[in-house]
Image: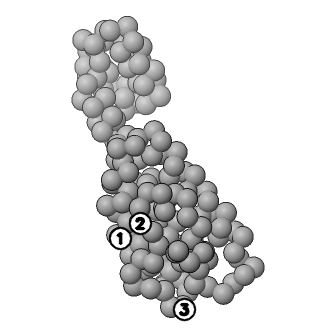
Amino acid sequence: MTLAKVKNLYDRDFALWIEKTVKQLKSGDLSQVDLENLIEEVESLGRRDKRELKNRLITLFEHALKRRYLPLSECYRGWEVTIKRCQFKLKDILKDSPSLCSFLTDICNDCYQEALENMRIEYDASFPDVCPFAKDIDGLLNHKFWQEEK
């Protein structure tokens, strides 16, 4: 199969391209592997995890802000569940890729600012300009954000 046909398969049927590429890699038949698209896909995996961490952290901060600063007790349980869900998902990603811990702490301020902007659009409430929450890994993954820091 020529490289043009392999690329055509990548464009035509991604799932079949994956199946074929995995078989080629497992058998050691590297001469026919579509390296260009394989490299692109592997690189995208790292970007995907970083995007997922960023999105989860923004959601975590949004719900932490709502839970701590909005007097809507009928909503607290749902916000707390979302906070815990985000923490569990962040833990899962970091368990698989511990090297992303530093990335997570690096993006905290930017994620908080994005969450803050979203909350100020959604609610007429006073939220702090500077992140009032722990920004270390343990604090992000385990803290009950509705409780004041000790």
Q: Alpha-carbon neighbours of circle 3 within 10 Å: few (<14), some, or many (≥20)?
A: few
Report helix, strand or loop for mark 1. helix
Q: Alpha-carbon neighbours of circle 2 within 10 Å: few (<14), some, or many (≥20)?
A: some
Three-letter code, disc 2: Lys
Residue nearer the viewer, 19 or 112 = 112
Report the residue at 38% width, 20% height from top: 21
The number of callouts visible is 3
Q: Are marks 2 and 1 in contact (CB under 8 Å)?
A: yes
> Does residue 66 show up?
no
Question: Mark number for residue 70?
Answer: none
CA gap, disc 2 to disc 3? 25 Å
Q: Earlier in the sequence, mark 2 or mark 3?
A: 3
Residue 145 position by quadrant: bottom right
CA gap, disc 2 to disc 1? 8 Å
Q: Residue 17 location, x and y as percent?
A: 41, 24
Q: Residue 131 location, x and y as percent?
A: 42, 77
> Does residue 73 show up?
yes
Report the residue at 36% width, 60% height from top: 105
- The residue that mark 2 highlights is 135
- The residue that mark 1 highlights is 109
Q: Establish if 115 lies above or below 46.
A: below
Residue 12 position by quadrant: top left
Residue nearer the viewer, 113 or 149 = 149
Q: Is residue 95 left or right of residue 81?
A: left
- The residue that mark 3 highlights is 124
Q: Earlier in the sequence, mark 2 or mark 1?
A: 1
- Quarter of the picture containing the N terminus is top left
Q: Establish if 11 lies above or below 24.
A: below
Report the residue at 59% width, 80% height from top: 68
